[in-house]
């Protein structure tokens, strides 16, 4: 190994170390931001080292340099602008989009390499190559569909078409056969093209039948897939840092997927097969959609709240989106000053991003002791006079207790068991899962259609007016 | 089977094991940022797309290399920026306390 090679390999090693340390620091909110910064530093070092390798080898033509420079500049600019502009609540779908890009890039690395073989390189290259194309293409189309579902471009409900299972099985068989052919060195370019197309189609049929509520878990799983595809690309082009970083993401992504599924009390298998196994998954979902809704005014809501003895506030992503955490705290303090017992019920996935809500409320100086986890607060709902739901939807939908809906089996807050319910929401629009919320048509529920910030300010003013 | 391949395989397996261990006990609070962080790390594929571009010599090769570089750069830059934006919201309690202390004009040190 020449000195030059040694230095480059050591830089790659340092980068890999920074990735591991960076991920580890993400275990705690206190060090997370520093972890991300370390990881980005490692990434910058690895990319710069790679550019140095290319300069030193002198292999790249001027055209190749221009292609690299232009491609990287365009991608970096697009990625930067999208990441800066995205709304807080739309972040998961953006992550999915970036994940699709990564998977696509990994697959393209393998395809490009395949086109440049002058002789068969042997199974130890061809097997990872086939796997790279397979996993990369599945994750590319699958992540695009997942992102589309969250963005509302693709309907969020599980989409099941007749014969879907047969199509999936045929695609799986085609992928298996072409993968074996590529590994054995037969079939040539045709096998790679067919594998790519089958894998792209498989990614679509894999994600379409899964409901929108499960998308964060699916995105996490596809993220792990991309990591694995990148590791395979590392085998194909013989690059250590791709193997290390890819395997790291593949494994940590898999663990994270499991943790996320656990938080929702679902198994990964259950989620992935969601649309396949249950034949009744679309029929009953809208059965109770036609009910009447009752609206309440700020004054009515204020009276209900001010004369209650126990109020539970259920914050959801609407509160996060409206940045109304300070207003909710003001209203709660006012009620407490009157002797009302106030608690906050925090669903594990409240606000679309797990844990997001705790942070927002803590920022508004809500005492941690008032924040109650789902399991802790659920038994208390029957004694609650008023449940004030602010911009939360699917996590309060009683439909989850019945089988056959897009959110069946998802743990929910038992808001419908409270004596009365006030829901602050901008419209009757659907949540993540794209289904009607039966809570809204419950006779004891009053709907208050407004932006969370505005609604809370009005209620606070009304409480002050009415009860001095 | 070359020794180089066996070395690569060793690296692969050990990296997998590190990946399994490194995030074993993460609070739900950090699930989404962690997913995003892992997402940016596989942006390392940019190193791969830069290397393959060097071997491109015809139009097809250039097009593939260009698209691959766009995708990979988007993944890596966008990934890190969006993760950082998420983590911005997760201000450490120490910073919050510091803010409160300044706001209250009190010099009380709790820890």
Image (cartoon, rainbow, N blue to C red):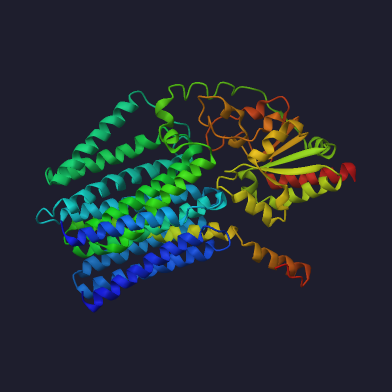
Give the percent coordinates (x, y) of residue B79: 44, 57
Report if residue A65 is visible in the image: yes
Q: Nearer the viewer, residue A126 or A80?
A: A126
Which residue corresponds to the image point at 18% horizontal and 50% vertical from the top-left?
A: A126
Which residue corresponds to the image point at 62% horizontal and 27% vertical from the top-left?
A: A438
Residue found farthest to the left: A119
In this picture, is A162 found above or below B29? above
Report if residue B56 is visible in the image: no
Which residue corresponds to the image point at 83% horizontal and 42% vertical from the top-left?
A: A340
In this picture, is A436 found above or below A256? above
Q: Nearer the viewer, residue A146 or B39?
A: B39
Give the percent coordinates (x, y) of residue A409: 53, 31
In this picture, is A148 found above or below A296? below
From the image, which quarter does the C terminus of chain B lie in? bottom right
Give the percent coordinates (x, y) of residue A93: 47, 47
Which residue corresponds to the image point at 24% horizontal and 78% vertical from the top-left?
A: A3
Residue A31 location, quadrant: bottom right
């Amino acid at each position: 190994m020449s000195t030059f090679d040694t230095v480059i390999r050591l830089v790659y090693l340092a980068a890999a170390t920074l990735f591991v340390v960076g991920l580890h620091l993400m275990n705690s909110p206190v060090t997370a931001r520093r972890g991300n910064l370390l990881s980005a530093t490692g990434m910058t070092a690895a990319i710069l080292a790679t550019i140095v390798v290319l300069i030193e080898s002198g292999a790249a033509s001027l055209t190749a340099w221009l292609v690299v420079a232009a491609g990287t500049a365009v991608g970096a600019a697009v990625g930067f602008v999208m990441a800066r502009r995205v709304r807080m609540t739309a972040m998961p779908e953006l992550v999915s989009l970036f994940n699709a890009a990564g998977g696509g890039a990994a697959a393209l690395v393998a395809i490009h390499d395949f086109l440049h073989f002058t002789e068969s390189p042997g199974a130890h290259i061809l097997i990872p190559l086939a796997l790279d194309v397979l996993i990369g293409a599945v994750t590319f189309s699958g992540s695009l569909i997942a992102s589309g579902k969250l963005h509302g471009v693709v309907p969020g409900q599980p989409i099941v078409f007749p014969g879907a299972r047969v199509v999936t099985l045929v695609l799986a068989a085609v992928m298996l056969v072409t993968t074996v052919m590529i590994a054995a060195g037969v079939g040539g370019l045709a096998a790679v093209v067919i594998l790519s197309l089958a894998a792209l189609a498989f990614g679509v049929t894999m994600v379409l039948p899964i409901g929108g509520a499960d998308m964060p878990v699916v995105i996490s799983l596809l993220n792990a897939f991309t990591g694995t595809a990148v590791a395979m690309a590392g085998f194909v082009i013989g690059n250590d840092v791709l193997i290390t970083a890819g395997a790291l993401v593949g494994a940590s992504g898999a663990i994270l997927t499991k943790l996320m599924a656990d938080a929702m009390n679902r198994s990964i298998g259950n989620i992935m097969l969601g649309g396949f196994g249950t034949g009744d998954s679309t029929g009953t979902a809208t059965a109770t959609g036609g009910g009447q809704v009752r609206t309440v005014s700020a004054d009515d809501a204020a009276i209900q709240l001010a004369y209650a003895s126990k109020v539970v506030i259920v914050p959801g992503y609407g509160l996060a989106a409206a940045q109304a955490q300070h207003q909710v705290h003001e209203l709660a303090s006012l009620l407490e000053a009157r002797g009302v017992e106030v608690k906050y019920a925090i669903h594990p996935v409240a606000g679309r991003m797990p844990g997001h809500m705790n942070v927002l409320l803590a920022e508004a100086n809500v005492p941690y002791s008032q924040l109650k986890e789902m399991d802790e607060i659920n038994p208390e709902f029957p004694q609650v006079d008023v449940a004030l739901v602010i911009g939360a939807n699917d996590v309060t939908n009683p439909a989850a207790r019945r089988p056959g809906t897009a959110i069946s089996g998802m743990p929910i807050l038992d808001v419908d068991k409270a004596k009365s319910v006030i829901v602050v929401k901008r419209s009757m629009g659907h949540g993540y899962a794209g289904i009607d919320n039966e809570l809204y048509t419950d006779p004891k529920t009053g709907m208050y259609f407004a932006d969370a910030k505005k609604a809370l300010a009005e209620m606070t003013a009304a409480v002050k007016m009415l009860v001095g | 089977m070359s020794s180089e391949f066996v070395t690569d395989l060793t690296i692969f397996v050990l990296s997998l094991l590190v990946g399994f261990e490194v995030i074993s006990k993460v609070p739900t609070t950090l699930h989404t940022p962690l997913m995003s962080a892992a997402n940016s790390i596989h942006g390392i594929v940019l190193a791969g797309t830069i290397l393959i571009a060097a071997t491109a010599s015809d139009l097809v090769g250039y097009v593939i290399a260009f698209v691959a570089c766009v995708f990979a750069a988007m993944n890596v830059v966008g990934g890190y920026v969006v993760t950082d934006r998420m983590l911005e919201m997760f201000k450490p309690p120490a910073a919050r306390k510091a803010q409160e202390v300044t706001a209250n004009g009190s010099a009380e040190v709790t820890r």
